[in-house]
Amino acid sequence: MSSQSSIRWFDDFVGVAYRYYDLRMNVVPLFTDRKKASSLWHDVIHWWLDSSIKIRFVEIDDKYWFIMGSDSQHPESNFSFFKILPESDNYERFKNGHGGEAYLRLGVYVTKFRKDVKNDELCYCGHAAEDHDKDDNDLCLYEECMCKKFSTFQVTILKRKKTITDIQFLEEKNIKNDPLAWNCLNINKYSKFS
Ligand SMILES: [Zn+2]
Ligand SMILES: [Zn+2]
């Protein structure tokens, strides 16, 4: 890696999905805008060398830091990704099941409302769209349910992929030994909040 101080950090994405797809775990940073995801792939990730892509996970309290970076054939326009995310079942599944290898893909995350879905699609509340009252702001009709508005989401995984083989879960007390994670927390945590 070139000089550590030159790493630029990017966190303008909405989250990370972990999905089985093509028989392998996929790590999928999520964007709400498809064009933004595509241009980011084109401008940054396309130039990454698969063998140098690193993903680091650092759990702090009940959150974790997602940290991803790579050497690039276009270092001048390169940057690294980070995001502080709540621990989730899918994250745990990835942690226990990745087997040292994953595909990196980008994803588009779209929130869908009552007008966007068929009657049998499920809401966050677990009840079907047709069980939400069209005349009352989509209120869920199940008496015991607190849901006041139908919503769900859809993740579209984009085709282009890179293979990641350098995946590590680190404890915060050990990150000084890992240049990428150390740089990330140093710039985005310690120098801001200490
Ligand atoms: Zn609902
Ligand atoms: Zn409901």
Image: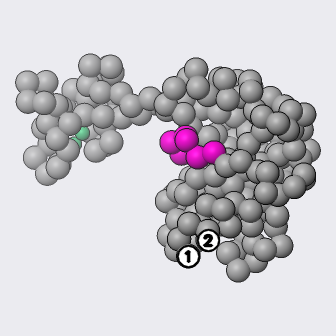
Residue for point 8% across, 24% down: 135
Camera sees residue 92? no
| In-front residue for pair 107/48 | 48
| 11 is within the stretch colored magenta | yes
* Lateral position of residue 107 relative to residue 76, left or right: left
* Displayed quadrant of residue 27: top right
**Pointer 2 residue:** 190
Give the residues drawn in magenta, as a range. 10-17
Q: Give, as a three-letter code, the residue at label 1.
A: Ser
Name above or below for residue 101 compared with residue 116: below
Q: Measuring from the top left, give residue 151's x and y in whole percent.
A: 30, 34
Q: Residue furthest bottom?
A: 173
* Displayed quadrant of residue 111: top left
Q: Residue 8 carries which label?
A: none
Q: Are marks 1 and 2 in contact (CB under 8 Å)?
A: yes
Q: Is mark 2 on a helix, strand or loop?
A: helix
Q: Is mark 1 on a helix, strand or loop?
A: loop
**Pointer 1 residue:** 194
Camera sees residue 33? yes
Ligand 2's quadrant is top left
